[in-house]
Amino acid sequence: MTEQILEMKGIHKYFPGVHALNDCHFELGAGEVHALIGENGAGKSTLMKILSGVYTKDEGLILLDGEEINIGSTLEAQHLGISIIHQEINLMQDLTVAENIYIGREFLKGFVLNQNEQDRRTNELLDSLHLSDIRANTKVSTLTVAKQQMVEIAKALSFQNTRILIMDEPTAALTESEIEDLFSFIRMLKAKRVGIVYISHRMEELKVICDRVTVMRDGQYVGTRDMADVSISEIIQMMVGRVIYTEPKTSSAVQLDAPVVLEVKNLNSRDVKNVSFQLHKGEILGLAGLMGAGRTETARLICGADPMDSGEIYIKRKKAAIRTPYDAVQEGIGYLSEDRKLFGLCLGLSVGDNIALPNLETHRRGFVIDDAKIRRTADKYIRKIGIKTPGFYTPARSLSGGNQQKVVLAKWLERDCDILIFDEPTRGIDVGAKSEIYKLMQELVKNGKSIIMISSEMPELLRMSDRIVVMCEGRATGELSIEEATQENIMELATKTMEGEMK
Ligand SMILES: Nc1ncnc2c1ncn2[C@@H]1O[C@H](COP(=O)(O)OP(=O)(O)OP(=O)(O)O)[C@@H](O)[C@H]1O
Ligand SMILES: [Mg+2]
């Protein structure tokens, strides 16, 4: 039996119109990795924000080493040895990596900043995390989402006194090899008796890294189990109260001679090298690859977000001149970005306005915005993909992470584009809602739409795609029909570097 360091009992939290936590329990042992699991909006982040001093609880007890504590601020939490890696990236984009990591506790020599020491310590920390391509003086805004996530992790690990480390979906933006690095780090922290709270929607990770699991549903505590005694499907049942099947696709329903709706020929840019492929009507084309393979960059060329150096795009066999995102939308291309905060959502606007925003022409009467119609549209999606929100008027900011992603999805579904590019569409989305989104995608292609899906989750690609194009270092290294695709041969193509070929 491990020594218990933390107990949370009878925790309640109210937000306007929402009873977000209703009598919640949680406990954590020294050196334990404890998974906290539940559907989008179940209350996981809220419970952990209370533990880390971001929110205050309305009722309940928090015991650290058996003694009641009151956590008034994040600073107080840090003094108690409680650190959190938030679900949403919280870095100052204009500052360097080192400045972000040591913000508020800079290294000083007398009264002046000792930048050399601060940078040296930062680089040491990054090296120990196998993050040698990120340096202390790198400006955060130049890093990809995944790398920024790693900086957040490095920051949380830089607190020397950490006894409790909360990781709120640390792997959502990471690829397999980065996840491996993270796991070895977690094992090291375990050996140092740090207790870790691990929030994730990637069920397959739980068995690998967690000792126990606590499940929440609708703000309530469902139960706690030893990982060794429970199966993944049992956990999912505790989460959603029903069984969900995930079977890979074994054959494609798309005819070989289905018309080509999109063709790209020899696309070139800084990050994309000579990429060509076709997309058929009614097809889901998977784009596989590791971080930095150029998948998002390719999508951004197709939808006019970045300029290309050379290359051609054909829509329904006709050459298209796409120079701006507006051109792409006119050509019937919708792009669901992987970075919902930057490109997907206006956090200050309501759920309804976010969905209606790209669809204003169908949501007005003359020159007047048709509020009743916006409301009907929003309500339709709130029901259809189960967006958990008090109503269509709620600001997007106050939704849970996964529910924000659903709002972005809804706005493109409503747009009625013939070609949809989904970049990591189910990142941060719970298993139940995932299967709803898969169903929706299937419905879309059945109705003659075509989809390009970028995903880092291989089971998802294998389950959804009719065909898979694999990329590595900006090039398309191969194409697999769904009949021949396996995790192994995708991996092989995804790591087929130029260097490897020259050897
Ligand atoms: N600042 C806030 N203001 C109002 N409501 C909020 C706020 N933060 C969270 N909520 C609500 O509290 C509930 C729980 O949200 P929380 O973010 O804890 O969910 P979660 O389990 O972390 O979900 P996800 O898996 O999507 O991240 C949701 O209904 C959410 O809309
Ligand atoms: Mg959350």
Image: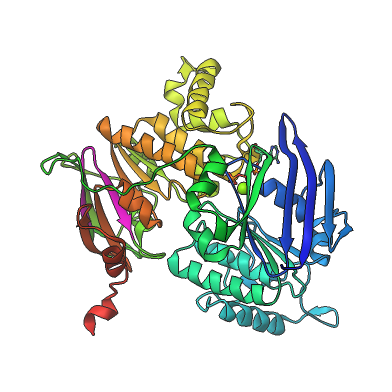
Residue 184 position in % (x across, y down): 55, 74
Q: Name the side, left or right, on which 270 lies relative to 22.
A: left
Image-based side of 383 in relation to 28, left or right: left
The relative height of residue 310 versus residue 132 in the rendered view (above or below) is above
Q: Give 172 or 39, whichever is nearer the viewer.
A: 39
- The structure residue drawn at horizontal position 64% and vertical position 44%, both measured from the top left corner, is 216
Q: Which quadrant of the rendered structure holds the C terminus? A: bottom left
User: 267 and 121: which one is in front?
Assistant: 121
> Ligand 1 is located in which of the four quadrants?
top right
| Quadrant in the picture for the N terminus | bottom right
Which residues, given as a range, are shown in magenta?
A: 276-288
Horizontal and vertical percent for residue 165?
A: 69, 64
Q: Is residue 168 above or below residue 346?
A: below
Q: Which residue occupies the foreground of this view, 374 or 160? A: 160
Count of numbered tags: 0
Q: Main secondary structure of the magenta part?
A: strand
Magenta stretch containing residue 330, yes or no? no
Q: Is residue 280 magenta?
A: yes
> Residue 456, located in which quarter of the rendered image?
bottom left
Camera sees residue 53 = no
From the viewer's perspective, is 334 left or right of 168?
A: left
Q: Which colour scheme appears in the figure?
A: rainbow
Residue at (21% x, 38% y) in the render:
281
Percent across and percent down for residue 328 are 33, 41
Q: Position of residue 128 (x, y in %)?
A: 58, 80
Tell me if I can see residue 243 in this picture.
yes
Q: Quadrant of residue 334?
A: top left
Q: Nearer the viewer, residue 12 or 245?
A: 245
Residue at image x 84%, y 49%?
A: 61
